[in-house]
Image (spheres, coloured by chain):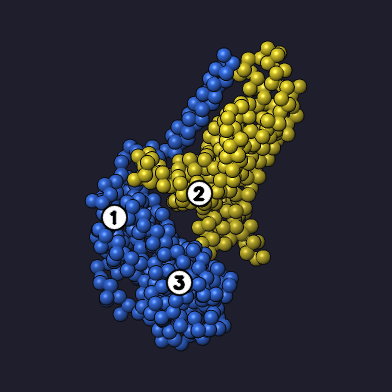
Chain colours: A blue, B yellow
């Protein structure tokens, strides 16, 4: 008998807990709204550079106002963004890892891959330039010099677009840096990797946009730029609804169309000019990759 | 050093001007972590008391599992909750991934073992004869439990503080299941990580200061309740 009342007491407590869970759910009105107006949400998986530069903070509110969609921006590396797309956990991707993107498209995971914009990668390092990479003609040559002098190189090491580019340059240089004492991987985003590089006085490969927006605190000058291999190209890809029926295809298309629309391209062109003196990205909608950087 | 002063100055600025974005982030942190703590209190105090007052086979295994759970790594919780809440995951139909609700769920999972563990220790620490005495005085089972909980008020409020402190300062799970979406699921800790990544160290320091102030304020209030003179 006593045990029974104890049981009832605990049932009451569990019930209360459940109740608070439900009211907790209700307390977040957007979650409720999301249920009423289905497929209002778009999950945008993108690289850290578009968030860290602040570009998306300008573009997303504009898109939401125009279309009434609600964009959930998940800023991760390009590798992880594509992994999310591959599992149907994102609707639209804004990424910069062309080789991986091609594989993604070949696997039928995405449709409508469209060129949005570009900037370029640069190699930055300590002002003293211990590896003497300044004046190198190509970036593989610069990487070779870093390897030969065993100067500290900080890598993203996170399968991001920047990391993929870095690996392709090492390959071109004929050097396998993995496991070397002078080669360290952070596994962090670009901004944090730049901070680590500055602190350790190493070299790193970075997209110009993130470098420009952080440069004031870094003390890491550009030591190598302008090599065609250093082109950094951003594409927008809609995740294939045929593979994953839950994907918000209409929303994805609306966002992709928005990114390549003339008005948006104009904003991209001027973004950052007033703050950094030069644009962070160059709009490229409708162009072909081969035409870029010329 | 300049940077820290800049950060403090920025924090003062953001607080005094009631910056709407920072205010929103702060209120969301408070709401999310507060709700998660409340849920963990219901679950933790009930199950902690139950385990403390009953004897059953395998009890030691359960207790050590609870104690391990007190150190549950937030990123592990974040990863598991993400996988479960994926569209194509077992709870995908709820459609709560990348919402504040998902953060509440993850944080409640983190805080519940903490509250359970402390409740368990607190209840077991009460004099064993107390239960008999209360029952002998004619109390019902419910009244006895209520008296026991009141008796253990001090450590139980410590459980509240530990649970709340654990979740308001947690970042790993919040960023994974919440997505750090501007104006929607961005809380103080995830905003701090992002501003650090952007190199806006002054803003990051300012957000940290606001987080510390908030944690202090809540704990001050709880401590006031905890250390209150017992009514005679």
- Which mark, by number, is residue B76? 2
Dots 3 and 1 on the same chain: yes
* Separation (CA) of disc 2 from disc 1: 28 Å
Q: Is residue A284 left or right of residue B51?
A: left
* Tag 3 subunit: A
- Residue at left offset 63%, top offset 49%: B212
Using the rendered view, name the quadrant where residue A162 is placed: bottom left
Residue highlighted by disc 1? A239
Does residue B184 sit above or below A99 in this rendering?
above
Residue highlighted by disc 3? A206
Whether residues under marks 2 and 1 lie with C-beta atoms below 8 angstroms apart, the answer is no
* Separation (CA) of disc 2 from disc 3: 30 Å
Q: Is residue B192 left or right of residue B97?
A: right
* Tag 2 subunit: B
Mark 3 element type? strand
Where residue A189 sits: x, y (%)? 47, 63
- Residue at left offset 59%, top offset 32%: B59
Query: Of discs 2 and 1, which sits in the foreground?
Result: 2
Residue neighbourhood size for the residue with mark 3, other residues' Cα within 10 Å, grouped as few (<14), some (14–19), many (≥20) = many
Q: Nearer the viewer, residue B2 or A157?
A: A157
Where residue B138 sits: x, y (%)? 68, 12
* Tag 1 subunit: A
- Residue at left offset 39%, top offset 51%: A72
Dots 2 and 1 on the same chain: no
Mark 1 element type? strand
Residue neighbourhood size for the residue with mark 1, other residues' Cα within 10 Å, grouped as few (<14), some (14–19), many (≥20) = many
């Amino acid at each position: 008998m006593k045990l029974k009342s104890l049981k009832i007491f605990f049932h009451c407590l569990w019930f209360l807990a459940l109740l608070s869970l439900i009211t907790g759910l209700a307390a977040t009105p957007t979650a409720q709204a999301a249920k009423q107006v289905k497929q209002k949400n778009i999950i945008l998986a993108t690289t850290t550079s578009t968030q860290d530069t602040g570009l998306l903070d300008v573009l997303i509110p504009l898109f939401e106002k125009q279309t009434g969609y609600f964009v959930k921006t998940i800023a991760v590396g390009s590798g992880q963004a594509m992994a999310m797309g591959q599992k149907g956990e994102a609707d639209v991707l804004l990424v910069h890892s062309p080789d991986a993107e091609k594989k993604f498209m070949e696997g039928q995971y995405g449709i409508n891959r469209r060129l949005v914009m570009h900037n370029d990668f640069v190699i930055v390092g300590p002002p003293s330039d211990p590896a003497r990479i300044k004046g190198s003609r190509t970036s593989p040559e610069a990487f070779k010099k870093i390897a030969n002098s065993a100067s500290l190189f900080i890598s993203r090491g996170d399968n991001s677009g920047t990391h993929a580019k870095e690996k392709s340059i090492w390959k071109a240089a004929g050097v396998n840096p993995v496991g070397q004492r002078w080669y360290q991987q952070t596994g962090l985003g670009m901004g944090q990797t730049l901070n680590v590089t500055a602190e350790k006085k190493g070299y790193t490969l970075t997209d110009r946009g993130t470098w420009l927006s952080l440069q004031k605190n870094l003390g890491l000058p550009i030591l190598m730029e302008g090599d065609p291999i250093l082109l950094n190209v951003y594409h927008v890809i809609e995740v294939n609804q045929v593979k994953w029926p839950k994907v918000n295809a209409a929303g994805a298309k609306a966002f992709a169309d928005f990114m390549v629309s003339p008005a948006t391209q104009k904003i991209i062109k001027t973004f950052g000019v007033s703050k950094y003196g030069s644009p962070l990205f160059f709009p490229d909608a409708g162009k072909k990759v081969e035409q870029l950087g010329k | 050093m300049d940077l820290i002063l800049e950060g403090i100055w920025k924090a003062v600025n953001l607080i005094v001007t009631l910056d709407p974005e920072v205010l929103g982030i702060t209120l969301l942190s408070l709401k999310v972590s507060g709700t998660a703590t409340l849920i963990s209190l219901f679950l933790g105090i009930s199950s902690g008391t139950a385990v403390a007052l009953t004897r059953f086979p395998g009890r030691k295994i359960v207790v050590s599992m609870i104690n391990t759970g007190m150190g549950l790594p937030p990123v592990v919780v974040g990863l598991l909750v993400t996988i479960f809440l994926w569209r194509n995951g077992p709870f995908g139909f709820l459609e709560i991934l990348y919402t504040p609700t998902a953060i509440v769920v993850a944080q409640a999972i983190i805080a519940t073992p903490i509250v359970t563990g402390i409740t368990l220790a607190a209840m077991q620490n009460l004099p064993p004869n107390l239960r008999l005495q209360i029952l002998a005085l004619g109390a019902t089972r419910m009244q006895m439990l209520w008296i026991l909980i009141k008796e253990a008020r001090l450590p139980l409020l410590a459980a509240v503080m530990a649970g709340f402190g654990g979740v308001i300062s947690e970042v790993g799970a919040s960023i994974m299941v919440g997505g750090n979406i501007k104006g929607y699921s961005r809380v103080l800790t995830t905003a701090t990580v992002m501003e650090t990544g952007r190199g806006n160290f002054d803003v990051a320091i300012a957000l940290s200061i606001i987080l510390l102030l908030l944690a202090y304020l809540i704990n001050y209030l709880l401590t006031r309740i905890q250390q209150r003179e017992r009514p005679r």
